[in-house]
Image: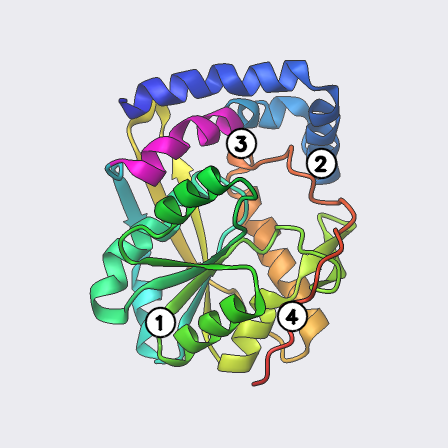
Amino acid sequence: MPLGLLHLLGVLLGWLAFAGSATYRRRFLANARQAGYGFGAVRSAVSHAGRMVAELPRLWLGKLPNCRMVNEACVTKAFAAGKGVVFLTPHLGCFELSVQVAARRWREKHGEITVLYRPARQPWLARIMETARNRPGVQAVPTTLAGVRQMIKALRRGAAVGLLPDQVPPQGQGVWSPFFGREAYTMTLAARLALQTGAAIILARCERLSWGRGYVLYFEELPVPLLDQLEPAVQQINEAMEATIRQCPQQYLWGYARYKQPRREAPVQEVAP
């Protein structure tokens, strides 16, 4: 289906969800308010959440839409250091597309980009997700100790990995750290990967253009070198995610339960250097 039509359907889905779920609506408004935004400033994020859902089949199973890259020179510079690249993007815009576009651009010279994903419990959906996640140039690995080890191996051979560091990890895989001024349980994996391997961190955000005209993928370096202690480094990454979100708050998933309590699950991050 044309991207513009999918996005039009997504607008309807987004507003239906916002109107139909009081819990989602309260969380959306509370999270935006925590970051200093009134509803008028981020109301378009309601429709962008719906667009995200509607575009997924196209991104997972169809031909990639048009996407222009901005400041790709900083990524080339990061790869040139030879210690790998950790791409970090928040739940903003079309984060599903960002890794595919980056993989298409750099896979020939630097290999696949490795990303973590949580397999679905339903077998039929798990098969679809495995196919969808493992697009050309992308290697999706499960959220297990083996998956984390594969990410470290990728970085050590100079390849790249991708993470959503504003995703709430299971109990034991994160620390409490401020996010827009409120304590949020935050993954340590992104910081651990960079600290263990010396990999460069690149911030990415993939913004949707209006009327289904495609996307723009922006790259930035971390403003200052990553601190060498884990918890301060995690906070530094949180601050970088805040700055990235503030560049396009109208496309952030404010309805995501960022401040929820972590679920209990076996830790996967204790990996030997």
Q: Amino acid at mark 4?
A: Ala
Q: In the rendered structure, are the residues bearing label 1 and label 3 in contact, judged by CB atoms less than 8 Å apart? A: no
Q: Amino acid at mark 1?
A: Ala
The boundaries of the magenta stretch are 48-62
Q: How far across and down, in percent of the image, does residue 200 sit?
A: 45, 72
Say which residue label 4 marks: 233
Whether residue 225 is visible to the viewer of this picture, yes or no, is no
Residue located at (53% from left, 29% from top)? 49
> Depth-wise, is mark 3 or mark 2 nearer the camera?
2
Q: CA distance from mark 2 to mark 1?
A: 35 Å
User: Residue sitting at 65 percent across and 66 percent down?
Assistant: 188
For badge 3, the amino acid type reads Gln
Q: Residues within 10 Å of mark 1 (few under 14, many from 20)?
A: many
Other residues around mark 2 within 10 Å, as few (<14) / some (14–19) / many (≥20): many
Number of marks in the rendered image = 4
Assign the N terminus to one quadrant of the image.
Answer: top left
Q: Nearer the viewer, mark 1 or mark 4?
A: 1
Of the residues tagged 2 and 1, which is closer to the observer? 1
Whole-Å distance between the Cαs marked 1 and 4? 22 Å
Question: Secondary structure beneath disc 4?
Answer: helix
| Mark 1 vs 4, N-terminal side | 1
Three-letter residue code for mark 2: Asn
Q: Which mark is residue 135?
A: none
Q: Quadrant of the C terminus?
A: bottom right
Report the disc number at residue 250.
Answer: 3
